[in-house]
Image: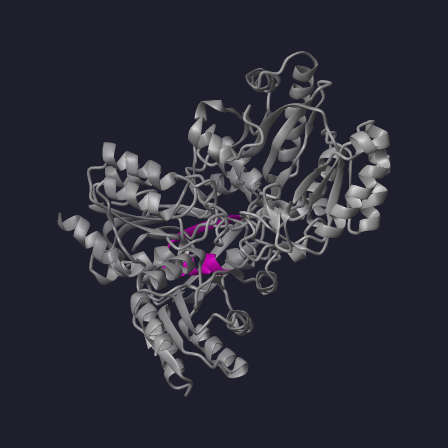
Amino acid sequence: MSVLINKDTRVIVQGMGKTGRFHTDKAIAYGTQMVGAVHPSRAGQIEVFDGETDHSGVPGRGDSYRVEIPIFRTVREAMAATGATVSVVYVPPPFAADAIMEGADAGLDLIVCVTEGIPVADMVKAKSYIQSHHGRLVGPNCPGVITPGQCKIGIMPGYIHEEGRVGVVSRSGTLTYEAVHQLTQVGLGQTTAIGIGGDPVNGTDFIDCLKLFNDDPATEGVIMIGEIGGTAEEEAAAWITANMTKPVAGFIAGTTAPAGKRMGHAGAIISGGKGTAADKISALKAAGVVVAPTPTDMGAAMLEAMAD
Amino acid sequence: MVFDWPAQRRTNLKIHEFQAKELMKAHGIPVPEGRAVTSVAGAINAVGPLVEASGNPVVVVKSQIHAGGRGKGRFKEDPELGGVTVVLDGIEGGVEAAKTKVAQLAGRMLGNTLVTVQTGESGKQVNRLYVEQGIDIETELYLSVLLDRGSSRNIVMASTEGGTEIETVAEETPEKILKAEIDPGLGLLDFQARDLAFGLGLEGVAFKNGVRFIKALTAFAVDLDADLVEINPLVVAKDGSVMALDGKMSFEANALYRHPEVQDMRDLSEENAAEIEASGYGLSFIKLDGTIGCMVNGAGLAMATMDIIKYVGGEPANFLDVGGGADKDQVAAAFKIITRDPNVTGIFVNIFGGIMKCDTIAQGVVDAVSEVGLEMPLVVRLEGTNVELGKQILDESGLNILSASDMKDGAQKILEATQT
């Protein structure tokens, strides 16, 4: 079991530019069922991918692959032709919110938006739009979602993951890799790892993911990686106290960040005394979460939480 | 992440008060009349027309720097003088007396250093003044438009406690803060604006003007992709007119491409030179006060690297995210920027190579060090794709590079190396 995506997930790409093509190739190499792409002016063309597999992804594949991906005019047409229910968005920032809303309107179950730098105002509109539709958005400005050994959607390096017992949810990209790597090293592995993204307005939050992992029989524990800014971690802590039946470990980045300065991510700004790392850490600890004192201790913190 | 799209500024753009008022005026939002000047002569020339137009002999001289707290701030060279000064001399002495006083103030302010709660001890040089007409103030209110992350929507925030920092109001009298959520599709609705105006205690002409002001300011903030528009104080004059006496604004970095008129208001002298240079190389850099320089890929990991340096007893000198696709030139630029800070005594490079391969990064570090000629301890921690190849390149480079097994090990190693 896993959450959001599995071996049967069929994925289309919105935005088959240089970046989209590069990561589509990596996803196919991993074994993800990439079945189509959407590009309004390149419809009818076929995008060919071939290369060597590194055997880190979906088991039972050959040494090499060759996949032809048809390009469609609209998400709706791509879904009808391919049976896809999930998309990954690599559309450049000015057009990405529109791509998300097109996906929601077409009825996708899940839209994973990797694009970084989408105007906040566009995301405010896209989030409002998606709330009145059926689908779920993960991101933007996130590495994506991976269920190790089954399906990789996004830009994360596949080989550091391992099928296992822990659900991962994170606001940061490379820090997710750090956590995943440590979970693999300590032998816990991952059920699904979800990057929810570093932007102030995103589609899926910590609580959404905690709910999914809490309901997933294969997930035995969850690690959540937060950072300064906003109050999402504090809200998650309250939810954990009230609802979570599984052990949770955590890490919060930004203890040393000066107030009012933006640390790379738009969401990571401490303003008006809210959103400090200290606030978040104490809220999580009060909820029984084992908080890793340093990013090197994330795997150990998860082991400790699961041993209790 | 690298996209087929030009690198953008990542820091939100702040503008000066005089620019904010210029923008508001252009968007039909009432502000007092004023003139931005850069010389004593300019300041003197501003007085006559302002007094004539308003019929009010009072003018205000306001230092134009980005930092807040200008009114309470004091000049380093002239500790009696505040950054914002009201000139009352015109009431008895007429325009000429006002001009004389303004000239004197301008002479004491221009070129001198204003220290406020937000500038830090070093202060900020004042190169421009805003000379503004005086207003017969009835009441001072507060109004702002900003993103509420909880609801993922913009909200309008208002309070009767104008002139006080809203953080203080939120802490001491939270019941005095009014909020209205802006529907992304519909904008602020008329009844919401009326509710806010009623809540602010406005009546009669002031009520009508207040509703109009709230609606105009909300549309302005949304149309220009403002991250924050804060009017404190928003004043009701004795004649019932409602206007912005101050205007603090910042504009969302990701949306600046569609507002060239705002982008043109960028004042480079208000920004850290190293941060500007770094952004030119696609690096996200923030200078801090410590001694250990950091170079990391990914914003979260970069923050966590600063944290772990502090955890082992050191102080980070900067935040630096080289992004997902750093090449040799970026790495070299990062080294140059880090080492230019005289406080830096050592550098910690922390890379989790995902899509980016460790051997590529290692080669980038080796080339950059050879090129820049680094004369301080360097600790490199590599993890991820092709990590063994990467380490081999570092080991065989003949350069004095210490290799670390994990983040904590790296932080400890650089601390030790800089302390001996």
Vertical position of residue B9 compared to residue B357: above or below: above
- Find the residue positioned furthest to the top: B204
Q: Count the marks: how many? A: 0
Q: Residue at x 69, y 27 (%)?
A: B243
* Extreme residue toward the front, this view: B92
Question: What is the quadrant of residue A18 in the picture?
Answer: bottom right
Q: In the image, what residue occupies the spot 24% across and 38% down?
A: A214
Magenta segment: A22-37
Residue B298, image x and y in percent? 44, 59
The N terminus of chain A: image quadrant: top left
Is residue A133 something that shows in the picture?
A: no
- Residue A69 showing in the rendered view: yes
Compared to residue A66, the image places residue A283 above or below, namely above
Q: Is residue A126 magenta?
A: no
**Colour scheme of this structure image?**
one colour
Q: Nearer the viewer, residue B162 or A60?
A: B162
Q: Residue, x 35% and y 61% (percent of image)?
A: B310
| Quarter assignment of residue B59 | top right
| Residue B63, position as x, y percentages in the image | 68, 46
Residue in front for this viewpoint, B54 or B299: B54
For the view shown, which residue lies furthest in the bottom direction?
Answer: B398
Residue A32 percent across, percent down from the top left: 38, 53
Q: Is residue A200 above or below residue A160?
A: above
On whether residue A29 falls in the magenta region, the answer is yes
Q: Position of residue B165 (x, y in %)?
A: 53, 35
